[in-house]
Image (cartoon, rainbow, N blue to C red):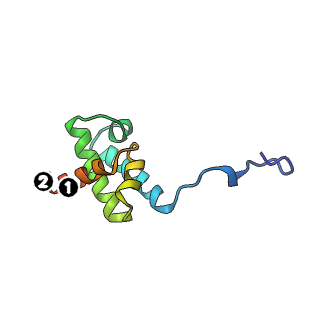
């Protein structure tokens, strides 16, 4: 809190970039469309529905934002960039 004004110190709060916020929205939409929970989509769930939702969300996020595989990996549950690359390659097969 800012002691002089009584408001929270927003400069200390971490902020998302516009692209990161966009990816979080894509994750939320994919979760609803594919009917999997948010935790399944960004968690360690390896079931087919979760993988399909995750791969589709990664594909859309990569195309819309142009973020690196590493940056997307962090947003999709702190995954390694090679996992993101694999999911991206599988979307054409799916």
Residue at horizontal 30%, vertical 58%?
60
| Above-or-below relation of 35 to 25 | above
Q: The residue tagged with tag 1: helix, strand or loop? A: helix
Residue 88 position by quadrant: bottom left
Q: Check the image and name the residue furthest to the right.
A: 4
Q: Nearer the viewer, residue 87 or 57?
A: 87
Q: Quadrant of the N terminus?
A: top right
Mark 2, Cα crowd under 10 Å, few <14 / some 14-19 / many 20+, is few
Q: Is residue 43 left or right of residue 91?
A: right
| Above-or-below relation of 35 to 57 | above
User: How far separated are the C-alphas under marks 2 and 1?
Assistant: 8 Å
For residue 59, which numbered disc appears in the image?
none
Residue at horizontal 58%, vertical 54%?
15
Mark 1, Cα crowd under 10 Å, few <14 / some 14-19 / many 20+, is few
The residue at which mark 2 appears reads as 93
Q: The residue tagged with tag 2: helix, strand or loop? A: helix
Q: Nearer the viewer, residue 36 or 80?
A: 80
Whether label 2 touches label 1, CB < 8 Å: yes
| Above-or-below relation of 68 to 73 | below
The residue at which mark 1 appears reads as 89
Residue at horizontal 33%, vertical 44%?
32
Q: Position of residue 8 (x, y in %)?
A: 73, 48
């Amino acid at each position: 809190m800012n002691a002089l004004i009584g408001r929270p110190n927003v400069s200390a709060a971490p902020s998302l970039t516009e692209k990161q916020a966009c990816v979080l929205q894509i994750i939320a939409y994919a979760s609803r469309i594919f009917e999997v929970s948010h935790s399944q989509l960004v968690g360690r769930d390896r079931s087919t529905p979760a993988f399909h939702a995750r791969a589709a969300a990664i594909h859309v996020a990569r195309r819309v934002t142009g973020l690196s595989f590493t940056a997307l990996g962090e947003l999709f549950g702190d995954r390694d960039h090679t996992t993101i690359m694999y999911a991206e390659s599988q979307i054409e097969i799916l």
